Image: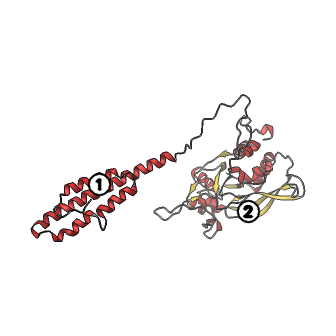
Amino acid sequence: MTDLAPSDDLAALRQEIAAQLAASADLRAWDAVRVGVLGKSGRLTALLKGLGAVAPEARRERGAALNRLKAELEAAIESRRLALEAATLEARLAAERLDVTLPPRPHPPAGAEQGGIHPISRTMEELVAIFGAMGLRVAEGPDIEGDWYNFGALNIPEHHPARQDHDTFYLPADPDGRRPVLRTHTSPVQIRTMIAEPPPIRVIVPGRTYRADHDATHSPMFHQVEGLVIDRGITLGHLKGCLIDFLRAFFCISDLPVRFRASYFPFTEPSMEVDIGWNRRTGELGKGGDWLEILGSGMVHPRVLANCGIDPREWQGFAFGMGIERITMLKHGMPDLRPFYESDLRWLRHYAADPLSPPSLAEGV
């Protein structure tokens, strides 16, 4: 095709370019048409450059006509590009389609293996059964907490390591500058319970907690259970009796040795670590002369009671907390924490509990 002189019919050029665009089957052919029209040496570009040779009395009309044609061709070229890209994407999706749905599961044959209760769920059921027999009920709260419930009300100071970003998962700050946190323990539920309810209070708080830690014995998400008892005249004797009875019932060892050691927690005073007897060489519980730390406990700090609107001169209480995965691993001889969350059916079948056999104190749990 020869170059058009200024007097050529622009309508013919418009029709010719439209036909070329319609015939372009892919983006490479489309780009050749685009460059041939709008490129530095393109046909329309040449016409615009030739306006200087048009007589002055006809230059205005000719320039307006060329600008209109340029706008029309640019719109047609862009429309064709979008159509070709959409067609290319559709072709690619059709060629690379992958069915990610699972086929329906066939009906299991008679006598097939039934499902089981995950060890963590089973341990929670056992905790509810044991502490429920002691008169404690289950309390729940949100996984996302504010600084006051997770730290401040529990007498945890500003400089405490648990408040640091490398130990705790923080969420983006709200408009007031406060940063919500994924709760690092279930203690905020104790605070919420003491604020919402008048004493006496007897609760256990099982649930998920989150900390920035991951290895064979730690997970960024894990489960914890805490207990809280608030009443008049509560003493360390009540705490010790409660925990000794619980540990012996849970591990099914009637004479399990239990030891209480002085310790420090910001939210209890006095505070105690609780150890159980075990054999360091064999790992057997209740045997040998070694001790294994199992949980933390103590009398609720008067300042924590006061933070929740409870008069510490009238009411006293004790609290304790332990990791659910930890006591589950000890009870069943599990060496590694990570399989709890790997969904390995072989591991689950081995450690799962019978769903038709709920825990019962009459059976020793």
Residue 231 seen from this side: no
Residue 27 seen from this side: yes
Q: Residue at x 27, y 57 (%)?
A: 73
Secondary structure, mark 2, is strand
Position of residue 60 in the picture relative to residue 148 (left or right): left
Q: Amino acid at mark 1?
A: Ala
Quadrant including the C terminus: top right
**Residue 162 point in image, percent of width and height:** 64, 65
Secondary structure, mark 1, is helix
**Residue 257 point in image, percent of width and height:** 85, 53
Position of residue 239 in the picture relative to residue 281 (left or right): left
Disc 2 crowd, CA 10 A, few/some/many (<14, 14-19, 20+): some
Q: Nearer the viewer, residue 223 or 253?
A: 223
Q: Which residue is mark 1?
A: 76
Q: Are marks 2 and 1 in contact (CB under 8 Å)?
A: no
**Residue 93 point in image, percent of width and height:** 48, 47
Q: Amino acid at mark 2?
A: Pro
Q: Which mark is residue 270?
A: 2
Q: Nearer the viewer, mark 2 or mark 1?
A: 1
Disc 1 crowd, CA 10 A, few/some/many (<14, 14-19, 20+): some
Quadrant including the N terminus: bottom left
Q: Residue at x 24, y 67 (%)?
A: 46
Q: Residue furthest top?
A: 110
Residue 149 image-quadrant placement: bottom right
Q: Residue at x 68, y 56 (%)?
A: 316
Disc 2 to disc 1, C-alpha distance = 81 Å
